[in-house]
Amino acid sequence: MKNYFLAVFTGIAVSVVVGFIIIPILKRMKFGQNILVYVKEHGYKGGTPTMGGFIFIVGSIISFFVWKSGDGHLAIICISVGLAYMLVGFIDDFIKIKLKRNEGLSPIQKTLFELAVAIIIAVFSYSRGLTKAYIPFTSEIVDMGAWFLPVCIIVFIATTNSVNLTDGLDGLAAGTSYVYFAVMATLIICQMNVFSSNYVNISEYRNLITLSFSLVGGLIGYLLFNTYKASVFMGDTGSLSLGGFIAAVSLMSGNVFFIPLIGITYVCSSISVILQVAHFKRTGKRIFLMAPLHHHFQHKGYSESKIVFGYKLITLAVGIICIVFCL
């Protein structure tokens, strides 16, 4: 247990150090964010350095390797997935900055890259027999068999894009995600105690917990620079990687069906966009003042800080419910 706390503190410390090093570099290289013109509340954010996702990615990975012990193949797979999605996000961010536009890769290009990573991890996981998952609020475990392949692919595409959509306010994606990883780590600990017979190699899951807490620390350290008013944005470099980490850790621990519950705020971001677009195409009218949902609340007059706090509170509340029903 002590190692888990140390993983959090190490993640915080390394991220803070990396942040103080990398932000001036991003400024000198003029890697500034281009802001969408129709988000008038964000006009002042133009030029803020982006690609800040490197801060918590580096901090989290270093923390993990400092405190991992025993077999950690599943955690290393999660890191590989996170880095793969980071690369997709980096390409997208680089195109945005180089061409001075807010759109980087086309939706088709980005989806193809994301799909390629999802297919690779789905096939790999299936070949290793990682097809079982807990059913939320029960003591049941289901083996999805061949159905695991489409489920895994859909989960990765949906999660990465949902987290990407949630990254719209200072500290929003990072804030909800560190709560998500803290809840997920606690959930795995509870499952290991309640369903101990399901685990052949305990150290694999302990290292998934260590990785989760390392990500908690890395994200908290990153928030020193990203809390309102942010001095750096994570960019797609960070948000796609974050989605990859969330999907991978949840899947490798058998908690893939908990993603839409603990990650309810990510779901709200995606559904609000889907409903807005579909309703507008059908009627020419909007359901929300602006989508994703956090921008609707912003237009209603709520401050960024209050919206971010509300999202974190909802994530924590749903997470606690999931943990309680696991016991």
Image: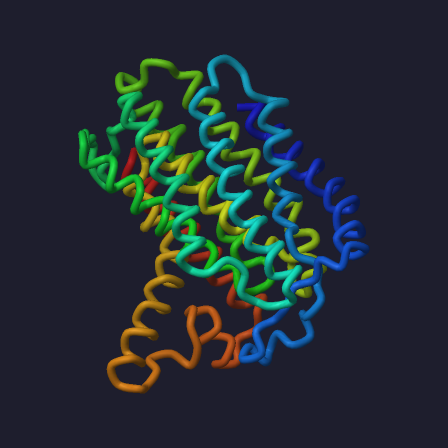
| Image location (x, y in percent) of residue 2 | 58, 23
Query: Quick check: 117 left or right of 57?
Result: left
| Image location (x, y in percent) of residue 247 | 39, 41
| Viewer can see residue 195 | no
Query: Quick check: 162 left or right of 50?
Result: left
Q: Which residue: 30% across, 71% down?
A: 275
Q: Which residue: 39% across, 41% down?
A: 116
| Viewer can see residue 30 | yes
Query: Quick check: 80 left or right of 193?
Result: right
**Would you place residue 276 above or below residue 87 in this image?**
below
**Would you place residue 110 above or below residue 209 in this image?**
below
Q: Which residue: 42% across, 60% down?
A: 107
| Image location (x, y in percent) of residue 265 | 40, 58
**Would you place residue 305 above or below residue 197 in this image?**
below
Query: Quick check: 20 left or right of 8?
Result: right
**Would you place residue 200 above or below residue 308 in this image?**
above
- In the image, 125 versus 29, the foreground residue is 29
Q: How is the image coloured?
A: rainbow
